[in-house]
Amino acid sequence: MLKARILTALAVAPPVLAVMFLAPPFLFEALVGAVIIGAAWEWSGLMGCASRIGRVLYTLVVAMLVIAAGVWMADDSRAFTYLIVVSLAWWAFAFAWLAIGPARQPGTAIAGLCGVLTLVPAFAALTALHAWDEFGPWRLLYLLALVWLADIGAYFFGRAFGRTKLAPRVSPGKTWEGVAGAFVVAALVITAGFYFSLDFGGPVAFAVFSLATVALSIVGDLAESMFKRHQGVKDSGTLLPGHGGLLDRIDSLTSAGPLFVGGMLWLA
């Protein structure tokens, strides 16, 4: 499985980086939109939608909301702020849900709303960060490295030292030792961010928001795990060998992105 993960990452990373740094911004928006729409199809399976027509309709609704969010942000400079506030409110609720009642399975409509609140603001955050200024692609690369390398650190630390379960009712494989590993690796990525002058708002604020981003990325991962557990599946899909589906790969980013960009917005 690890070999498959590495090979998939090596195959996917170059074209994604090329679009991030070399292509016109609208192509990057199209790429992120396509990933979000693909993740919406996978989410429709996690919300208990049994019919293919229902899954297609849900995916189309998310697609229209993604397009509407892009148009709204282009026409109203306050729109992005509204989306970030809504997103952070959702993730605060998701954290409470995970802590208090993760076994409680929502109805299809509620689960669908949760998917919208997860995916649409993530599209807004990632595209806004990319287009923020001339350093936007580099800060986006920093965010991706921060979240995904922390996830790798959690995986290996958890495998090597994991003893204390983090959320056994949601994801029995995750441990507090893995969380510690995530923060150790995050500290190294933050140091690299300082070195390459990607920080904003001063070193303390940058470090605090980066660590908070990693913490919330774990919540995003656990939230998706909760919905998968409700449906009795291990992965959201099979598109990415070794990783699962698109949603399995971006679950941490859906929560981390809005917080990180919200921090930039607040400090700016």
Image (cartoon, rainbow, N blue to C red):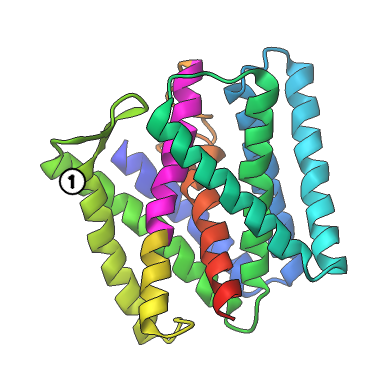
Look at the image and tell me in which quarter the C terminus lies.
bottom right
Residue drawn where x is 47% and y is 33% of the image: 97
Residue plotted at (48% across, 25% down): 228
Image location of residue 10, percent across then percent down: 43, 55
Segment colored magenta: 213-231
Figure quadrant of the N terminus:
top left
State left or right for residue 179 relative to residue 149. left
The answer to whether 100 is drawn above or below residue 178 in the figure is: above
| Secondary structure of residue under mark 1 | helix
Check disc 1 and report the residue beneath it.
177
Q: Give the percent coordinates (x, y) of residue 135.
A: 57, 82
Query: Residue 45 versus residue 205: which sits nearer the camera?
Result: 205
Secondary structure mostly seen in magenta is helix
| Quadrant of the rendered image containing residue 209 | bottom left
- Residue at (49%, 69%) from the top-left corner? 141
Determine if the magenta segment contains residue 224. yes
**Residue 56 versus residue 198: which sits nearer the camera?**
198
Label 1 Cα crowd, 10 Å radius (few <14 / some 14-19 / many 20+): many
- Taking 35 as reference, is 254 left or right? left
Give the side of residue 205 with respect to residue 71, left or right: left
Residue drawn at x 66%, y 19% as measured from the top left: 108
Q: Is residue 239 magenta?
A: no
* Residue ranking furthest to the top: 50
Residue type indicated by callout 1? Glu
Location of residue 188 (image quadrant): bottom left
Q: Is residue 244 visible?
A: no
Camera sees residue 44: yes
Percent across and percent down for residue 128 are 67, 67
Residue 171 image offset from top left, x and y in percent: 34, 29
The number of discs equals: 1
